[in-house]
Image (cartoon, grey):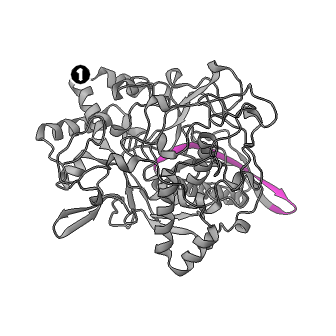
Amino acid sequence: MFLQASRQLEISAVIILLTLSSQSMAEMPESLSQQHLNALVQEDPQQAFIEAFEAGDELTEAAFTSERGVGAKVSETGNRFTRFPRADLKGSGEWATHIPARETGPVAQACIACHSAPYANGSGPNPLNGVVDPLHTGDPSMYLHRNTPHLFALGAVQLIAEEMTAELLQIQDDLEKTVCSSSQTASVPLSAKGTSFGMLTAMPMKTDGACTADFDRSGIIGVDEDLVVKMFGWKGSHATIRAFTRHAAHNELGMQADEIVGELDGDHDGVTGELSVGDLTALTVYMAALERPISKIELAENGLLELPDEEKKLIEDGRKSFAKVGCASCHIPELTVQSPVFSEPSSQIGFFEEIFPSGQKAAEQGLNQVTAIRFDLTDGSPNNHVAITADKETNLGAFPGNENGEAVIAWYSDFKRHDMGPLLADAADVHGFGASVWPTRSLAGVGSTGPWLHDGNATTLDEAIRAHGGEAEESRLSYEALAEQERAAVVAFLENLIIIDLDPEEEEE
């Protein structure tokens, strides 16, 4: 029997979800040496991947202790954790003086304390929302609320962003060659994987006899002016899993990575060396290679779920209506990754830091592309290897490939920022591109990750859709104009997009 995989899903089969005992927090692991991983890559690259993945698994489940550095000096009275930002605490070593500047917390001892639904590494209920004050206003009316997102298959997200960035930068390079060869101003549309990011204009500029382009970036939309596509963090403020992870570790756990503080005790808890460079590599590889979200339809096609014909029809009708009302124009059902090998660290411009935020050189700390850990999205996931029959096994944790050797990613996003209207606006515009502007949220696994929206304010998927405005208002109005049965079909289609553990090691006796 399957356990319940989401709030909407009950299925009967021989495979079981993660047991409750596996959600208990694990013992605290030792710090992982990046130099050890580098040596292992040169000796046995596949073993290096497996060891990094398993170490990342241990780190996400670990209940960190104060001796390891969890928590922070929140106040002079000795508090280590706080559910609310404390910009009012400005004394020596207190909350408001931490380096890097603190947005929230610390709130927990372990990643899976918040990332827990439908099982470890998943999302979280709204009582676990992050309450953040990145501008240090000290004003509760300006606090931002962040619901816990799931962490599955993030390698696909970064690789799509990397390839889109490469396309956009190539357009920019080609434009520079064009204006320099013609000696005339020119403009070109910016597009990557079928998504438009506006226009880029350039004029030739000669200095000491050499020509370079003087770019007018005012026509760029939906991405930063550097053309690096960023999808991590609710606002799309981080380009890489690594940057997102060390930011979350600092804020939510009070675990400060060496690469953001070096030897400094930035949170004044009396501990340094809290997360090594190797630890961050392991966490990155782990989240990159976690099993992908799947669908009820795919489970049924593989004989793992008995899905009544009427439910199949409802889901299919919902898929068609989802496209008809325009949702699929931003929540693009599938994108392909041409080179499906994830690499940590990356070699793509914008996705590798030569200099860590601490000021240290990455190479001097052991992180370099020569000894990068790699795995293939289409066969590398260690999880959800399923015996379909007695003599047939398939890896449903990996993404399917096509005849061109590409990975097919059902992520339901265009990887672009959009204005979503006043109902979805933050209280403050932290990043400067608009309080109501968000990257298109993935719908992969959305049937298993309620409550919904950035603040967990939508208790149903119907509510989440009806909150859409701004650039999505026309699609929302079209959805609202559907007959009640058609709207129910759209919701059924979304509830079909789930996260589930199919590991045969977790079979019930």
In the rendering, at what x and y percent does residue 308 appear? 12, 41
Q: Nearer the viewer, residue 164 or 184?
A: 164
Could you tell me which residue is drawn at 48 percent across and 62 percent down? 53
From the viewer's perspective, tell me whether residue 116 is left or right of residue 491: right
* Residue 386 within the magenta-colored segment of the rendering: no
Residue furthest right as drawn: 208
**Residue 228 in sight in this render:** no
Q: Which residue is mark 1?
A: 483
Q: Position of residue 138 (x, y in %)?
A: 70, 23
Report whether 408 appears left or right of 231.
left
Left or right: 126, with 502 as reference point: right
Task: Depth check: give the residue in front, 63 or 161.
Answer: 63
Say few, some or many: other residues with alpha carbon within 10 Å of mark 1 (under 14 / 14 to 19 / 20 or more).
Answer: few
How many numbered tags mark residues here? 1
Asked whether residue 217 appears in the rendered view, the answer is yes
- Expressed as whole percent of the image width and height from the top left, the position of residue 460 reads 35, 26
The kind of residue on which mark 1 rests is Ala
Q: Quadrant of the C terminus?
A: bottom left
Q: Quick check: 295 left or right of 445? A: left
Report x, y in % for residue 364.
Answer: 73, 68
**Image height check: is 406 above or below 308?**
below
- Rendered view: 348 above or below 413: below
| Quadrant of the image occupied by residue 88 | top right
Q: Secondary structure at mark 1?
A: loop
Q: Residue furthest bottom?
A: 43
Residue at screen point 24% across, 66% down: 393
In this picture, is 394 found above or below 236? below
Residue nearer the viewer, 81 or 130 = 81
Give the residues in magenta.
194-210
